[in-house]
Structures are given as structure tokens and as C-alpha cells.
């Protein structure tokens, strides 16, 4: 009987096991299957979170997902063109108001302030605004304007001594100063506090935004309490706002909701749902306790009490994501629409855009063009924004391997290679840091000679910068969108030393040829400057004799100027040097030449910003000259098209966009344009009032924006450069690591060269 | 029939996984070894010829073989000796003092030897670097002991190979020892008792009982040691980077660089050759066990 019972139990167990196994198999297979039904999330604009991350190679979105925010330009009065932005607020009766100013070019002092009001779909100057005259009478430079919840206007600005004053602006044009003592310099300080912003509550309480806290005062000016926020040195910080009873801001990586009764935090909201910059994000209320977060990735919204952020407006599809623009003001309209005011980075002039939900627009553009780069690049982002605004049917997805400040690793390249091998990967590859030569040999990159020829034939490009990428058979697989070059400054005798390794080694001036720095930078710098002499441009190899000459030359230069492999903290402070390393080793050293510690200086020019100090140094030393290092230049933003790209035609158009005047004319601090017309516009750009300064110890130098003649001189130099330099980083690392003991005096140059050549021969034979 | 099917059913999940995730992709590897880099053109034996003519491959393959030839016998000997000592010590202890006491004492040895397995490679390599760098502990010890300054960069010089061998032994001895101990426990104690009664000495018992009884374990330990030896790349890479001293430049170094350069045609050809060699080795190592099972 017992045996029978056991048998039946065993049978039952076996059946149960089989049942479970079948269930597991079915659920595993079912879990892997692709959903074919309509997406539950495809509900107009709210579906964009899902649509934001299409799998690589997946170019078509599901049909039927309709509705998204469209962007239209709002015409601003012509008079605004030369004015600078001050504030964009909702004023009396909820009307939108834009405050601007005419400024003195050099000092930035406000000459006249203006108020524009939005009426019947257009902006009109408010001629009756008395605020300008009132502030002029008070000799105040207007900085902030606010319309308080108490129904009064408030204005803040600085006086001649750069002390801040806050006023309640009365309807009759008079002004009553508030919080008089709060902005005065405190004990021993030269300047008083200049707040980033202020808000006035319904009961007259005033919230003043300082660097890392917001202080609340009662209507009589008595300090009540402070509420901590993340630090911001920006005088237009918008990472916070007040409602009737709450203050909301970014604090310790979260969004904190403070009670305005006692200053305590009543809620922390997870910030991780918001993508993009945390420093430049603007927070604003939705009128019912919810929050809008606005930055370059778009507009996200979270309801009160909610934990999720929905992306209302995808910033990558419009001007919000454009790198040449800075979002200065953002307001919600009356019908769930939005208005944004932008200014150019480093330039005057404003643009306004209106964001309105359009149910007839596809939720996500039907075609996705992917651009891959190892590191984020502003020119690529700029081109992506412009391309999308010109091609509403295309979404450009820029994928970067590392975020700002991250380190590129071999695993990232391997990850990309895996995609490329499977015939997928991005449509466009930005080849900076990638094994471009290998990709060309393996057929990964498409021949884009037509795009290159078309660009060159247009007469608009600096053909000398593009010609270096033509293969022997005439094919073109990569085109640079930006370029930089080393600019030498010094007297003729010193500059002539840069003609060869031999002349560098033989140079015997009163001062060393180059300034003191760590040996790795010195090695990298000389490798770039003497690239043609050192390396085989096809294989990147270096001969043993040449390697020895190179190592010895660097040693001679280093011995003369006191370079070391590693500096101690004390040495760093004494000689103003550091152990940090640049990929091309070219640290700005025009100031070193000016200080008289070396016979020449070098600047790696990637724009006219970098030229200011060098131009000023040349003014100080009339005997000095500018010179290029042979004909070398450093190409960047190297664009190529994946031969397996699904959207080849659009990819070609994107590269045309990348090289176009509209993208190239923007100075995004990542290199000179390769577009001649854009470069000419840079030459013609004046930046009055711009100045830059530096100093260490007793030495200091300040410089203005370089004059047009100097800018033209640099442009002429760029036109002569024909040799693109891309030093193989693997080879460079081998040389740096293999020569360390030599520079530390632990081994001979021959031992170092032997060690390097051993590794190099393995690398080259691979 | 039923008895034949049941074992296969138990094997099915893992066998299925191996076929799906290793077997089939490997067939693709073999296919691609006869094609160009992007798999668009048949190139016959060109890739194999290119790989065999490649001096980096010859160096890496030579180093890998040298590493296997030195390390596998060394590891098996060291781990076997450790297992024998612990097993013998435990037996003596059990006979003289009782099981509980012996367990505590000898588990310390076992744990000490197995511990390196549990330490992440990155942490372990950090310690090795502290020990072996020019200003490291080893050089300071030698300087103190000899009275002259030692500043040898052990990981980046001709000493790199012994260093890597030591790392491999340190990491894997405990694991292999456990396998040997399991094998030793499978040999009946009665056999030893009977042999002792017949007057067999220690070496006779070892030769006629222990070694024949461990033939199956020998194959298993051998195969797993070879497999683990291929993983030593992780330590080599962390210790000395992508391009280490030529003496420890191994096949995985080369594969990693080929993959970075998308030289898939070379990788697949080399992988096919290496797999063939590894299979042959595995069969040779597994032979003693197979013969015993047949008997």
C-alpha cells in the first residue's frame, strides 16, 4: 500500500515538474517575442519617452503615434536686434513681458532699458513704462525684473560701486528700496551680495536667491530663514521657483520641495528622470503644484506627488538642443503651450520660439538618423538641431560613448565594433578617437567622394583642409568639420629651431626653446610638431634611429628648461606647472614666452578665443612673430558614413549640413571652421568688451578680442595648412611609458628605444 | 530506452545552451574564417595563411604554449601535493585526536588556499602591483636583505613571465586542490588499509592505489587548468596593460587588439585553429579517465 502511495506521489511530482518545465519554456519564448500589437504608450505627446530610444538600426516608428509639440519662431521687434536680454516674465494680468537693454559695449553698463509686451500675437514696446527713467534717476543698472504675487513690480540692479539694490516699482514711476542692508558688503568684503534672482510672495515676503541658498524675508525686511539649494554662480540662475506656500529647487541631486511656513523640506523628488544638464536646467511651476524642468534635452513634467517625469517636448528636435543658443527665459502660455527666449552664446541678439502641441504631427519623426561619437561634440549637436529643423521628417539621434568628463575605454570601441560587424551601428560615425584607417580597410566606411567634391567645387570650403583625406584611388571616407593648429610665437631665430629635430636639439638661445612642463606633454608636443619627420604616415611607425633622435631631442629640451616626468606639489607651485597631460601636449605657453622663461611659445588655436593672449604677447614683443609648425593642422569632428547605413542619402545630407555655413559659422570652441565663408564671418566678428586675463605669482596679462588684421592673418595661415596630424595614440603611449625610465635617469636612451621598439614591432605586426 | 533518454533530459538545458550560445556561434566563426573581414567574400585559406605568417600571432601562440607547458604541470603538481598533505594530515589527525578538532585545523589550510579564488582579479592585481612595482614591497625587501638598491619593475621586465606564473598558481592552486581532494575521498580507505597490512609503503600506496584512483580526476583537473589558463589574460592585462613585456604577450592580447581593429577574419581563423588545438589537448588530457570508464 505504501509503495503504491509513493509511486502515485512520484508520478504526480513528475507531472508537476513537466508542467513547470513547459510553462517556463513557453514564458521564456513568449518573453523574447516582439510585441506586434499597438503600443499602449502611443498617446500623443506623452509617448515620447518610449520613442526617444529607438534601437540602433530601427528606423521606422510604429504608425499611428501622432501628436507632438511643434516649434514656430516668434517675430521680435527689429529694435531688439542690438539689445541684450534682461528678463522674460508674466506681468500684470498674466501678460508676457520681455525686458531688454542697450548697453555700453566695453563696460556693459545699461544705457536704456525697455519693456515689450505681447499683445494680439505680436510684441510691442511699452512706451509708457516708467521703470527705465526711474532706474536711470537712481543710477541703477537693471539686472532683474519680477512681478510679485502681491501684484507689484520689482526691479533689481547694481549701482556704480557694484552694490545691488532691490526696489518696488510704483505705478507712478517712483521706486521704494527694499532690504537695504542685505546687499551691502559684509565685514571685510569688497563687494556685497548680488542675488541670482528674487521673488515676492502674495503676503509681501521676499525670497532672495543667493549662491547656495534662498533666504526668505518678511515684508518688513526681517530675515526669516534660509533654504539650501545646489550652488550656482550664475546671475540668472533659474533652478527654483516659489508658489504660494512652497519653494522648489535642486538640492543635493534631487528636487526639493520646501515649505514656506518654516523652511523645512516636505518632499524630495527623484531627479534621475530628467536627462541632460543639471546646471542649466530651468524649473517652473505648472500652476497646480507640478513642475516643468527645461534644458537642452527638452521639457519634462512631473505632477505634484508624482515620481515620474514625462517628456513633453523633445529638445533634440528643436532649438532647445541647439548648442549655439542659450535658453534665457521660458514661460508656459495660456493653452498648454510654451514660449522660450534664446540668446546666442557670446553674442547679442535674441530669438523667441513658440512650442504648441500639434495633434497632426507624428509623435516621433518617421525616420531616425543615428550619429555616433566617442565624446560629445557641440558642432555635431548644432548640426543635428539644424538638420532636424530643416527636415521635420527626420529625427537625428546623437549617441555618445562617454558623457562629459568621462574616459574613453577600449570596451567602448569594442562595443561599437560589435554593432558594425553585425551590419548595424550608427548611420554616421564621428571618427575622432576611432580606428578610422582600419574601418576604411575593412569597408566599414562608405566612399563619400561625391559629398567632398561637391563641397570643394562649391568654392565655399578650405579645400586644403579636406584634400588630406583623399585616398590614392580618389575615394574619400572621412571629412573633418573642424580644425585646429599649433601657432608658434617668438623671435625668428627661435622659430627656425622648429624646422627639424636636429635644429630643436641644437638650439642655444639665452632661454630654453620651450617652457618647463612634464615630459609626457613635451613628448606629445614634439611628436605633433614634428609629425612628418617622425612617423610613417601610412602605418604610424617610427624607425629606431629616429626614435632615439626624438627621445634625445626631448631630453635636451627638457634638461634646458627643467622638465620632469612628475612634479611634486611644491615644484608645481614654484614653477607654475602641473602633471596633467593634453592629448597633443600643446599647453598654452605664449605667456611663458612673455614672462621670459623661454624663447618661444605655442598655442593650440581652435578659435579666436585662444588667440587673444598670443596676440597681446606679440604686441608686447614687437620683435616676435607668429608662425605655423610646417603645414600641420589637427583635424577634428571627422565624419564618415557607415556603409551599412539604412539612410545613406540622409546621412550624406547630414554631412553637407555639418559642412554648411549655417553650422560652421557658430564658434563652439571646438575648432576653426573648414568652411571658408564661415571662417570669413569669424574674421569679421567683433566682440566688443570681451577681455581675458591670466596670471600667476607676480605675472599677469590681460587681452582684448584680437583685431581684424590679426584674425585675417590667422585665416591666411589656415589656408596654407595641408598636413593633417593624427598621431597614433597606441604608439604615443608606448613611447611615453617606454621612455619614463630614460627621463628619470634610470636607463640609457638605447635601452628605452629597445623596449619601445619591441612593443612597437608587436603592435605593427598585428 | 527510458533509461537512455532520462540522462539526456537532464543534460538538455545546459547542452541546449551550449549548442545555442557557443556551438552555433562557433560554426559562424568557422564560416567567417574563410571570408573577408566583413563576411562578404570567400577567401579560401588566405586568413589562415595570414595568421600563420603573422609574427605577433606566432609570438602570442608561442607564449601561450610556453605558459601552458610551464604552468599546467606546475599547477597540477603543486595542487596535488597540497591536496595530499591536507588529506594525509587530516587522516592522521582524525586517527589521533578526533574528527572535530582535525576539521578545524585543516579547514584553515583549505580556506587559505581557496581564498585567492574569491578575490576579484582587479583587487588582486592592485596588491601584486604594490608588491612588484619598482618602489614596491619586494624591491624594498631585497634592498634591505642584500644591502644594495633594487628597483626592478617585475611586471614590465623579463621577470614578467615568472610573475604571471606565480599569479596563476596563487589564484588556481586552491581550486585544483579541492578537485584533487574530492578525487582522494573517492578512493576507499579499505584499499589503503589492506595495502598497509600487505606491507606496502607510502610510495607503493601512492603508485598502486592513489595515482590509478585519480586517473579520472587527472583529466578533469587538467582540462579545467587549461581552461583557467586562458583566463590569465585578465591578470596579465590588469598587471601590464595592452602591450606587456613580450614574454607575457598572449593570444587574448592579440585577439583584443584585432577586435579593436576589426580584424575579424584573422580572429576567426586563429580562433578556429586554437579551438582545434584545445580540443585535441582536452581529448588527450581526458583519455585516462575515458579508458578507466571503459574498463
Image (tube, grey):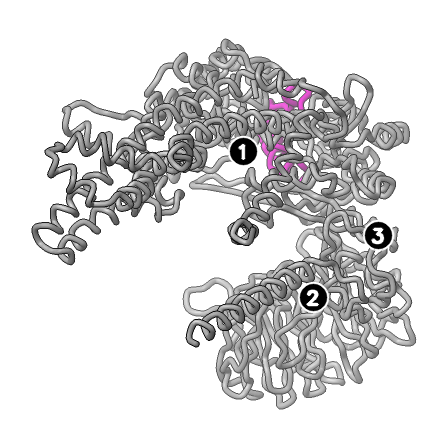
Residue most toward the front? Answer: A1
Q: Nearer the viewer, mark 3 or mark 2?
A: 3
Mark positioned earlier in the residue sequence (3 or 2)? 2
Report the front residue among A332 and A144: A332
Which residue in the structure is indicated by mark 1? Answer: A587
Asked if residue A620 is among those painted magenta in the image, a careful observer would answer: yes
Which residue is labeled 3 in the image? Answer: A367
Q: Position of residue A691 (x, y in %)?
A: 63, 46
Mark 3 residue crowding within 10 angstroms, few (<14) / some (14–19) / many (20+): some
Which structural element holds mark 3? strand
Q: Is residue B243 left or right of residue A386?
A: left
Magenta residues? A604-632
Question: On what subunit does the disc labeled 1 rest?
Answer: A
Q: Is residue A545 above or below residue A630?
A: above
Name the element at disc 1: loop
Which marked residue is nearer to the observer: mark 3 or mark 1? Answer: 3
Mark 3 or mark 1: name the one nearer the start of the chain: 3
Name which residue lies at 72% across and 46% down. A687
Amino acid at each position: 500500500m505504501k509503495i503504491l502511495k509513493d509511486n502515485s506521489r512520484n508520478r504526480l511530482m513528475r507531472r508537476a515538474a513537466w508542467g513547470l518545465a513547459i510553462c517556463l519554456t513557453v514564458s521564456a519564448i513568449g518573453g523574447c517575442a516582439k510585441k506586434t500589437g499597438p503600443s499602449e504608450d502611443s498617446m500623443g505627446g506623452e509617448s515620447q519617452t518610449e520613442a526617444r530610444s529607438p534601437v540602433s538600426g530601427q528606423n521606422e516608428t510604429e504608425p499611428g503615434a501622432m501628436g507632438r509639440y511643434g516649434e514656430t519662431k516668434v517675430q521680435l521687434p527689429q529694435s531688439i536686434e542690438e539689445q541684450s536680454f534682461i528678463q522674460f516674465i508674466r506681468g500684470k494680468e498674466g501678460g508676457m513681458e520681455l525686458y531688454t537693454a542697450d548697453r555700453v559695449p566695453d563696460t556693459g553698463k545699461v544705457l536704456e532699458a525697455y519693456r515689450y509686451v505681447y499683445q494680439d500675437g505680436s510684441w510691442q514696446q511699452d512706451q509708457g513704462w516708467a521703470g527705465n527713467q526711474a532706474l536711470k534717476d537712481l543710477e541703477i543698472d537693471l539686472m532683474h525684473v519680477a512681478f510679485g504675487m502681491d501684484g507689484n513690480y520689482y526691479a533689481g540692479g547694481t549701482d556704480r560701486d557694484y552694490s545691488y539694490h532691490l526696489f518696488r516699482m510704483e505705478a507712478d514711476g517712483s521706486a521704494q528700496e527694499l532690504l537695504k542692508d542685505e546687499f551691502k558688503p559684509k565685514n571685510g568684503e569688497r563687494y556685497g551680495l548680488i542675488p541670482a534672482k528674487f521673488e515676492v510672495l502674495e503676503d509681501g515676503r521676499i525670497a532672495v536667491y543667493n549662491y547656495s541658498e534662498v533666504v526668505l524675508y518678511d515684508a518688513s525686511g526681517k530675515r526669516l530663514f534660509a533654504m539650501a539649494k545646489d550652488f550656482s554662480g550664475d546671475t540668472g540662475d533659474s533652478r527654483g521657483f516659489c508658489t504660494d506656500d512652497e519653494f522648489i529647487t535642486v538640492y543635493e541631486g534631487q528636487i526639493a520641495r520646501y515649505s514656506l511656513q518654516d523652511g523645512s523640506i516636505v518632499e524630495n523628488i527623484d531627479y534621475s528622470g530628467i536627462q541632460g544638464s543639471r546646471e542649466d536646467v530651468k524649473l517652473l511651476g505648472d500652476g497646480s503644484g507640478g513642475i516643468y524642468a527645461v534644458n537642452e534635452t527638452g521639457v519634462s513634467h512631473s505632477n505634484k506627488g508624482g515620481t515620474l517625469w514625462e517628456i513633453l517636448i523633445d529638445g533634440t528636435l528643436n532649438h532647445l538642443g541647439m548648442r549655439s543658443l542659450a535658453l534665457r527665459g521660458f514661460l508656459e502660455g495660456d493653452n498648454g503651450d510654451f514660449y522660450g527666449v534664446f540668446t546666442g552664446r557670446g553674442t547679442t541678439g535674441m530669438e523667441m520660439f513658440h512650442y504648441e502641441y500639434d495633434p497632426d504631427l507624428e509623435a516621433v519623426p518617421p525616420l531616425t538618423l543615428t550619429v555616433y561619437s566617442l565624446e560629445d561634440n557641440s558642432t555635431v549637436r548644432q548640426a543635428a538641431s539644424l538638420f532636424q529643423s530643416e527636415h521635420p521628417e527626420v529625427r537625428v539621434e546623437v549617441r555618445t560613448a562617454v558623457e562629459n568628463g568621462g574616459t574613453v575605454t577600449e570596451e567602448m570601441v569594442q562595443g561599437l565594433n560589435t554593432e558594425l560587424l553585425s551590419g548595424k551601428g550608427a548611420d554616421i560615425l564621428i571618427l575622432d578617437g576611432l580606428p578610422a584607417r582600419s574601418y576604411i580597410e575593412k569597408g566599414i566606411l562608405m566612399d563619400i567622394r561625391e559629398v567632398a567634391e561637391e563641397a570643394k567645387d562649391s568654392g565655399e570650403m578650405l579645400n586644403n583642409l579636406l584634400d588630406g583625406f583623399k585616398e590614392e584611388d580618389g575615394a574619400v571616407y572621412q571629412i573633418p568639420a573642424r580644425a585646429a593648429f599649433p601657432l608658434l610665437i617668438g623671435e625668428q631665430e627661435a622659430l627656425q629651431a622648429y624646422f627639424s629635430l636636429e635644429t630643436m636639439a641644437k638650439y642655444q638661445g639665452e632661454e630654453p626653446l620651450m617652457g618647463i612642463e612634464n615630459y609626457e606633454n613635451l613628448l606629445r608636443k614634439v611628436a605633433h610638431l614634428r609629425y612628418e619627420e617622425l612617423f610613417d604616415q601610412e602605418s604610424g611607425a617610427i624607425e629606431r634611429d629616429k626614435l632615439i633622435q626624438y627621445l634625445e631631442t626631448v631630453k635636451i629640451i627638457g634638461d634646458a628648461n627643467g622638465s620632469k616626468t612628475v612634479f611634486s606639489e611644491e615644484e608645481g607651485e614654484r614653477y607654475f606647472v602641473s602633471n596633467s597631460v593634453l592629448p597633443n601636449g600643446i599647453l598654452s605657453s605664449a605667456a611663458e614666452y612673455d614672462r621670459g622663461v623661454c624663447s618661444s611659445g605655442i598655442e593650440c588655436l581652435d578659435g579666436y578665443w585662444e588667440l587673444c593672449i598670443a596676440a597681446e604677447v606679440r604686441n608686447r614683443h614687437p620683435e616676435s612673430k607668429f608662425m605655423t609648425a610646417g603645414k600641420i593642422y589637427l583635424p577634428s569632428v571627422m565624419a564618415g558614413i557607415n556603409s551599412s547605413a539604412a539612410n545613406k542619402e540622409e546621412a550624406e545630407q547630414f554631412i553637407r549640413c555639418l559642412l554648411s555655413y549655417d553650422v560652421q559659422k557658430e564658434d563652439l570652441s571646438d575648432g576653426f571652421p573648414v568652411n571658408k565663408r564661415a571662417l570669413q564671418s569669424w574674421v569679421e566678428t567683433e566682440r566688443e568688451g570681451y577681455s581675458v586675463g591670466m596670471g600667476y605669482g607676480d605675472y599677469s596679462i590681460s587681452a582684448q578680442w584680437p583685431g581684424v588684421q590679426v584674425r585675417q592673418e590667422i585665416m591666411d595661415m589656415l589656408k596654407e595648412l595641408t598636413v593633417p596630424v593624427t598621431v597614433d595614440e597606441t604608439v604615443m603611449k608606448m613611447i611615453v611609458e617606454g621612455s619614463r625610465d630614460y627621463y628619470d635617469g634610470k636607463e640609457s636612451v638605447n635601452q628605452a628605444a629597445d623596449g619601445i621598439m619591441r612593443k612597437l614591432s608587436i603592435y605593427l605586426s598585428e | 530506452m527510458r533509461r537512455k533518454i532520462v540522462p539526456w533530459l537532464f543534460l538538455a538545458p545546459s547542452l541546449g545552451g551550449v549548442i545555442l550560445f557557443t556551438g552555433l556561434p562557433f560554426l559562424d566563426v568557422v564560416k567567417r574564417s574563410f571570408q573577408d573581414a566583413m563576411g562578404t567574400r570567400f577567401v579560401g585559406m588566405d586568413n589562415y595563411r595570414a595568421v600563420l605568417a603573422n609574427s605577433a600571432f606566432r609570438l602570442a601562440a608561442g607564449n601561450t604554449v610556453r605558459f601552458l607547458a610551464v604552468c599546467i604541470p606546475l599547477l597540477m603538481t603543486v595542487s596535488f601535493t597540497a591536496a595530499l598533505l591536507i588529506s594525509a594530515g587530516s587522516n592522521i589527525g582524525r586517527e589521533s585526536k578526533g574528527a572535530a578538532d582535525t576539521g578545524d585545523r585543516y579547514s584553515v589550510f583549505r580556506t587559505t588556499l581557496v581564498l585567492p579564488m574569491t578575490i576579484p582579479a582587479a583587487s588582486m592585481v592592485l596588491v601584486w602591483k604594490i608588491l612588484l612595482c619598482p618602489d614596491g614591497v619586494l624591491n624594498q625587501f631585497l634592498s634591505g636583505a642584500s644591502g644594495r638598491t633594487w628597483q626592478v619593475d617585475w611586471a614590465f621586465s623579463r621577470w614578467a613571465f615568472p610573475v604571471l606564473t606565480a599569479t596563476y598558481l596563487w589564484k588556481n592552486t586552491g581550486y585544483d586542490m579541492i578537485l584533487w581532494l574530492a578525487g582522494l575521498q573517492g578512493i576507499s580507505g579499505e584499499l589503503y588499509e589492506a595495502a598497509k597490512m600487505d606491507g606496502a609503503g607510502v610510495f607503493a600506496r601512492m603508485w598502486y592505489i592513489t595515482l590509478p584512483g585519480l586517473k579520472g580526476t587527472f583529466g578533469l583537473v587538467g582540462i579545467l587548468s587549461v581552461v583557467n589558463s586562458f583566463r590569465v589574460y585578465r591578470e596579465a592585462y590588469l598587471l601590464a596593460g595592452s602591450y606587456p613585456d613580450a614574454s607575457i604577450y598572449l593570444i587574448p592580447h592579440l585577439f583584443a587588439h584585432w577586435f579593436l581593429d576589426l580584424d575579424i577574419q584573422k580572429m576567426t581563423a586563429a580562433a578556429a585553429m586554437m579551438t582545434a588545438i584545445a580540443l585535441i589537448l582536452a581529448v588527450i588530457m581526458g583519455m585516462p579517465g575515458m579508458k578507466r570508464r571503459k574498463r
